[in-house]
Image (cartoon, helix red, strand yellow):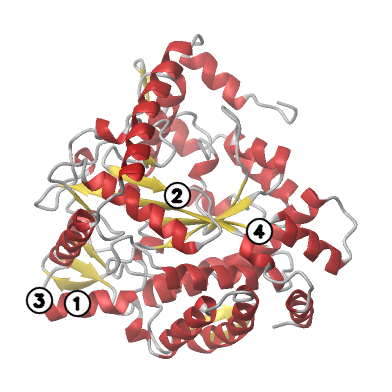
Amino acid sequence: MVRNAEKRLASLLNTQQRGLLRGSLKGLEKESLRVDRDGHIAQTPHPRALGSSLTHPWITTDYSEALLEFITPPESETGNTLGFLEDVHTFAYHNIGDELLWATSMPCIVGGDASIPIAWYGESNVGWMKHIYRRGLDWRYGRAMQAISGIHFNYSFSDAFWEVLREHEGDARDLQTFVSDAYFRLIRNFQRFGWLVPFLFGASPAVCKSFTGGQNIDFHDFDEHTFYEPFGTSLRMSDIGYKNNAQAALNISYNDLDSYVRTLERAIATPDPEWQRIGTRVNGEWRQLSTNTLQIENEYYSFVRPKAVARSGERPSRALHRAGVEYIEIRALDLNPFEPLGVNAGQLHFLEALLVYCLLEDSPEISAREQCSINHNQGQVARYGRDPELVLDDGGTPVRLRDWAERICGDLETIAELLDQTRPDTPYGDAVRYYRDSVRDADRTPSAQVLASMRGHGENFIEFAMRQSRQHEHAFKEHVLDPETRRRLEEASRTSLEEQAAIERRDTLSFEEYLARYFDQTETA
């Protein structure tokens, strides 16, 4: 660690207020495709028993009508987060008939774009906006890459933690400004060090050939049905995943909140010649929300996003401008196909330690040259991360991935001491030690285990994913919801349907007027 990071860590370890990080909140957004028993994407509508995908607080859809997304409320204990996620999965399995939840990030058998139904959110203006935004993604990038699943990890530090850190750093600015700047310090460092996540947790080294329509995009043949990368960790995070070539020149700034909001809003307001050729509304049919570089903020892809809780109808960038950064969203996690929930507690403990490390390390501004290096590192790790000789760029210095990862994990052991304060056990220290061993032996990583399992069972990618999906189905159908939890989830579904109907009744504006008002929000709105 650099000297300032060591000073910050030492002051936090020695503070009278021990266990400050126990108040940090975490949540998950976990995506899973609904598929039929033959491994094809489900063509059925979002089950009514799961409520409204527009208004349900915990069960919604992502790009596709068949792409479920489960959302956990903020919790201070990882066990509570995973427990809630297990309950929601169990509830879903009791309401999707004979369908399965796909266990891997890379999709099931894809029969072309037409086989992937775009999510539908009802007849309200906000519902139409969500649907047309997804139509725009189809026109711009195609539907197949939108069917890739992942897990987003949401994290926020407590006000008590921020107060102590601000005092220790002798910062006299107001708390909101200090917190936003500190989160951006974390975000810049996560871009620098976040490649460690797909290296350790990546679980998508292979893909069904139907995903590319049989086109070989620089892959190896695993068998007649599967492409793969021998040292790949996360094809989901590679250049075959969600990518907008026009975004490469956006230069979204992560140097401070104002710069981030300004550059992001500029992209939403800047016309793009390629998207202009598509058109917005053609022959009375909406194709996309606008012909600008980005339709809305969510279209910009990033490993990590600053977030604020938006008010009804408020644009995310306006919410950030008003409230400052309230939490961060980490978007680098593949589904772990060996875990029914797609993730386990050890992964989340390690990730939390990495986030604290990114906060405490000094974090200079990212230059255009360094951003190119960051993008290169992320791409190399996604495709070739388990290559023992892979070299990355550490601020202009070539360094072997294994050596860099070993150094970071060494620093994380001290971070784990801070996170384990006041606990009777050492879950953070245990996680760091476990994954440090994976740095030393990459055959322990999920991506290596996926390929080993496929070879051991003589399976192609689809056969492997189906086997894992059926195992997970059995686990969730064996899990019994307690009556109060079942009642709570059933009530949430009923209430969400009523809320969607109420929203549709309240609409008075035409969709064109609604959209104009949405994009015309000002700094004081």
* Quarter of the figure that contains the C terminus: top right
Q: Nearer the viewer, mark 2 or mark 1?
A: 2
Q: Secondary structure at mark 2?
A: loop
Mark 4 residue type: Phe
Q: CA distance from mark 4 to mark 2?
A: 17 Å
- Residue at image point 76% right, 69% down: 17
Query: In the picture shown, does residue 247 fall above or below 162?
Result: above
Where is residue 435? Give x, y as percent.
45, 82
Query: In the picture shown, does residue 495 fall above or below 196?
Result: above
Q: Is residue 341 left or right of residue 209?
A: right
Nearest the camera: 355 or 450? Answer: 355
Nearest the camera: 275 or 320? Answer: 320
10 Å crowding of disc 4: few (<14), some (14-19), many (20+): many
Q: Earlier in the sequence, mark 2 or mark 1?
A: 2
Mark 3 residue type: Gly
- Please tell me the numbered disc located at residue 72: 2
Q: Earlier in the sequence, mark 4 or mark 1?
A: 4
Mark 1 residue type: Ser
- Residue at image point 59% right, 84% down: 413
Q: Earlier in the sequence, mark 3 or mark 4?
A: 4
Q: CA distance from mark 3 to mark 4?
A: 46 Å
- Please tell me the numbered disc located at residue 453: 1
Please tell me in which quadrant of the rendered image residue 319 appears.
top right
Q: Earlier in the sequence, mark 4 or mark 2?
A: 2
- Please tell me the numbered disc located at residue 157: 4
